[in-house]
Image: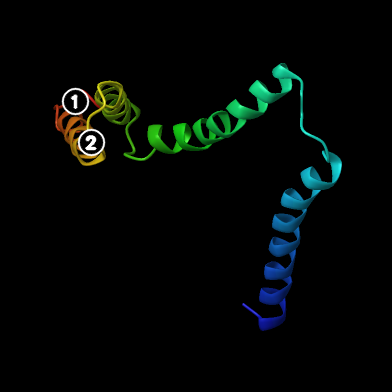
Amino acid sequence: METQSFFVYVLVMALVTYLTRMVPLVLFRRRIRSTFVRSFLAYVPYAVLSAMTLPGILYSTGSVPSAAAGLVVAAALSWREKSLLVVALAAAAAALAVSLIPGGAL
């Protein structure tokens, strides 16, 4: 990669990052009073995070059934408020167990 194109990429990335943080501050000078808009904005980060991570979870193992098993186990243990380590290890174990079933998770 050329040094010049590297700096162009970094400059564009910095500009995009700056604009996404600056535009709301310029447009919304007062406190947002609408309860609908405030509740909508409160849920946007969760929706975006889910939309970004769910495809990565389902295609991470190369087998959708084993990844789905890991996702279900992780969701169930998270719902029961288990620690992050327990959730991660149990989800990985579930995905591995399903992928080891002969002919079951192709």
Quarter of the figure with residue 10? bottom right
* Label 2 sits on residue: 83
Image position of 64 (left or right of 11): left
* Label 1 sits on residue: 103
Image position of 7 (left or right of 92): right
Name the secondary structure under disc 1. Answer: loop
Point 21% across, 41% down: residue: 85
Q: State how far apart marks 2 and 1 are (Cα).
A: 33 Å
Residue 80 higher or lower than 7, as above or below: above
Q: Residues within 10 Å of mark 2 (few under 14, many from 20)?
A: few
Q: Tell me where residue 13 appears, x and y as whole percent.
A: 69, 61
Q: Could you tell me if residue 45 is visible in this image?
A: yes
Q: What is the residue that sits farthest to the top in this orientation?
A: 36
- Disc 1 residue type (three-letter): Gly
Name the secondary structure under disc 2. Answer: loop
| Between discs 2 and 1, the one toward the N terminus | 2
